[in-house]
Every structure is written in C-alpha cells, then in structure tokens.
C-alpha cells in the first residue's frame, strides 16, 4: 500500500516560524511534525509519496539523514495545487490495483490507521475519511453519517447555521484508485470538489477517540504538545537544572535546561537547552530548543523559536516569537 502526505502549503499561519523552516519540520515534542505522521503509518504501507514545493531542499536534506520505515518518494509541486491537485500531481506513481492513503502532514492524532484501513475495506467503500468531534465545526469539513457509518452529507467550512454535525474531517483518507478519475487538472480541493461526487458511490466516515490537533496553527502546535504530554506524563529530564522552580501539570522539561525561580505550566513544553530566569512564568506555551526567557517575563499561549531570546520584563500572549528575515520585512 502507498500513502501520499500533503505538505504543499507555505505554513503562513505559523509565520514567522515558517520563514525559517517548512511546516513539516516544525518540532513537536522535539520531533519534526512529519515524523509523527510517518511513525503513525499503518503496517501495510511500503511507500510514502510526498509532493513538496516550499523549502523542498531542506526537507530532502532532513529525510536523507533519517532511518525511515518505508521508501520515501519526493515529487516536485512547483505551486500549491490544493489537496486534490496535489494527489493528481502524483497520479503517475500511484498503483492502480490497491487502496491508497492520503494524509494531511500537519495533523497529530490518536487514530489507529491500521484499524482505519480495515474499516475502509470492510465497507467496500470508494473513499473513507477519519472524523473527529469538535465544539465548533465551522473551520472544517463537516460530515453526517447514517447508522452504518456511510457519509450522507459533507460540507466544507459551513456557517454555524449551516452546520448539520459536529463530526469534522480529521485529515486522513483511504481512497480507491478510481477516485483519481474525479480529480481535474490544476488547483483542486478534494473536500469541496471531489468528496461531493463520491457520496452516492459509497463514502464512509471513521470516528475515533483520544486526541486530535491541527498543527497548521500556533494553537494547534501548542495543543499537540499538551496532548502528548498528557499521554506520556509530565516530566523533568534528569540533566535539567531547576532551582526554586514551580511546576504545574501538564508540563515537560527536556535535557540541559536551566530554570531559576520560574513557574512552568500548566500546558508548557520547555525544549532542550532552554533557559528561563527569575520570576518568569511560562503558561500553555512551547519553547523550542535553545530558547531563552530573561527575568520577569510572562508568556501565555506562545511559541518561542529555537535560540530566540525573550528580553527582561516581556509580557505577551497568543504570539509566535521568532526572528523575521530582513527580506521578509522588506516584502511587507
């Protein structure tokens, strides 16, 4: 079985972090986002196809130095083609005699993809998608199921009044090869254009419990850290130095950190080699490796980039703190 990982976007909602690196390489719990997806692949998958445009060379260099469980084929996507267009762009590589998977490369979830594939095949579906229940479905594609799990209606990003369900597209698709015939050339949205054509041909929804985070946003990256810390448990690495520091669960402190009279948590991840000094408070935030927070700071709902220094007396919330390249400033 093959899988296609969708990573073609520019990661604009994670800027300025993604000025430095592509979204698939944004670290989550010290590991690039795309590696979480790769490690979740079902056992049947023997090849992963990745259409890439933005910062392709950086992704190729990273993958070349990894021991991967499957063959990885990188394909050029010179301009964003949408979820459907990206799949159509690699049609020549997809085997025509087997189910294939399409996985959004910015999702971290507890879904068991082995069980998802079994579900799809048991239903003899032309397409199946994973579904997650949310409070507010308006930013997502919404599905309505019958008693057998068949999708009766699907609508992308409805208004509150239009939303007929709280089950939303969770970003993993199992597709039969004939779905490729429904995808036209150029930019195509799988969700807006292709899925509506498949409803009458047997499209199913696979619901799951646990956790789900859309890491295409600052909020999603933070939420993914919190969910994974809850899964594995709060901890302070043995080599971390913590002097008169208070911890509020859930939290994670990686090796070689130096924390002095700080408050960490709830919901905070402190990456390897970070420094947090006197009377600073880190709440529901992620510090990437080497970040430094000077005295008397308060960060809430923030991401701090690698080796970035937060100066004394900084109090901010809902921000990504990272250097902005000079050429990007000039563009704006």
Image: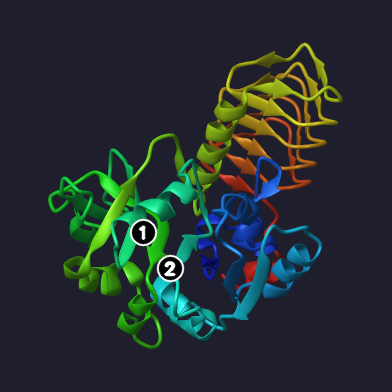
Residue 266 versus residue 75 in the image, above or below: above
x, y percent for residue 153: 17, 58
Q: Residues within 10 Å of mark 2 (few under 14, many from 20)?
A: many
Q: Quadrant of the C terminus?
A: bottom right
From mark 1 to mark 2, how far is it between C-alphas?
A: 9 Å
Which residue is farthest top?
244
From the top left corner, tell me how far across and down residue 24 is, in percent: 61, 59
Viewer-side residue, 257 vs 214: 214
Q: Is residue 143 visible?
A: yes
Residue 123 relative to residue 145: left or right:
right
- Label drawn at residue 121: 1
Q: Is residue 118 above or below residue 30?
A: below
Identity of the residue drawn at 63% across and 37% down: 286
The tag earlier along the polypeptide, 1 or 2, is 2
- For image coordinates 66% across by 69% down, the residue present is 72
Indicate whether 320 appears above or below 245: below
Which residue, as the protein is rendered here, is positioned at the far left?
161
Residue annotated with mark 2: 99
Residue 34 image position (x, y, % from top left)? 62, 56
Residue shown at 19% from the left, 48% from the top: 148
């Amino acid at each position: 079985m093959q899988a296609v990982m969708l990573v073609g976007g520019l990661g604009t909602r994670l800027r300025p972090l993604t000025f430095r690196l592509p979204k698939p390489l944004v670290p989550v719990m010290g590991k690039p986002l795309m590696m979480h997806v790769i490690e979740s692949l079902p056992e049947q998958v023997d090849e992963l196809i990745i259409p890439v445009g933005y910062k392709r060379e950086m992704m190729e260099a990273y993958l070349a130095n990894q021991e991967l469980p499957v063959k990885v084929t990188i394909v050029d996507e010179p301009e964003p083609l949408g979820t459907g267009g990206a799949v159509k762009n690699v049609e020549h590589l997809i085997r025509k005699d087997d189910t294939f998977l399409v996985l959004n490369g910015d999702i971290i979830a507890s879904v068991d993809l082995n069980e998802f594939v079994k579900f799809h095949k048991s239903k003899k579906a032309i397409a199946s998608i994973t579904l997650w229940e949310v409070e507010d479905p308006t930013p997502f594609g919404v599905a309505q199921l019958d008693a057998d799990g068949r999708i009766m209606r699907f609508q992308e990003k409805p208004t509150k009044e239009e939303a007929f369900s709280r089950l939303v597209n969770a970003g993993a698709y199992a597709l039969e090869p004939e779905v490729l015939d429904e995808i036209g050339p150029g930019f195509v949205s799988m969700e807006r254009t292709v899925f509506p054509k498949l409803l009458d041909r047997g499209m199913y929804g696979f619901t799951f419990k646990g956790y789900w985070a859309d890491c295409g946003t600052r909020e999603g990256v933070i939420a993914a850290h919190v969910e994974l810390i809850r899964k594995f448990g709060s901890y302070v690495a043995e080599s971390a130095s913590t002097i008169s520091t208070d911890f509020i669960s859930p939290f994670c402190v990686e090796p070689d950190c130096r924390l002095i009279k700080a408050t960490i948590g709830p919901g905070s991840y402190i990456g390897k080699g970070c420094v947090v000094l006197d009377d600073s408070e880190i709440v529901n935030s992620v510090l990437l490796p080497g970040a430094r927070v000077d005295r008397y700071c308060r960060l809430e709902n923030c991401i701090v980039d690698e080796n970035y220094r937060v100066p004394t007396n900084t109090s901010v919330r809902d921000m990504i703190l990272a250097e902005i390249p000079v050429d990007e400033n000039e563009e704006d």
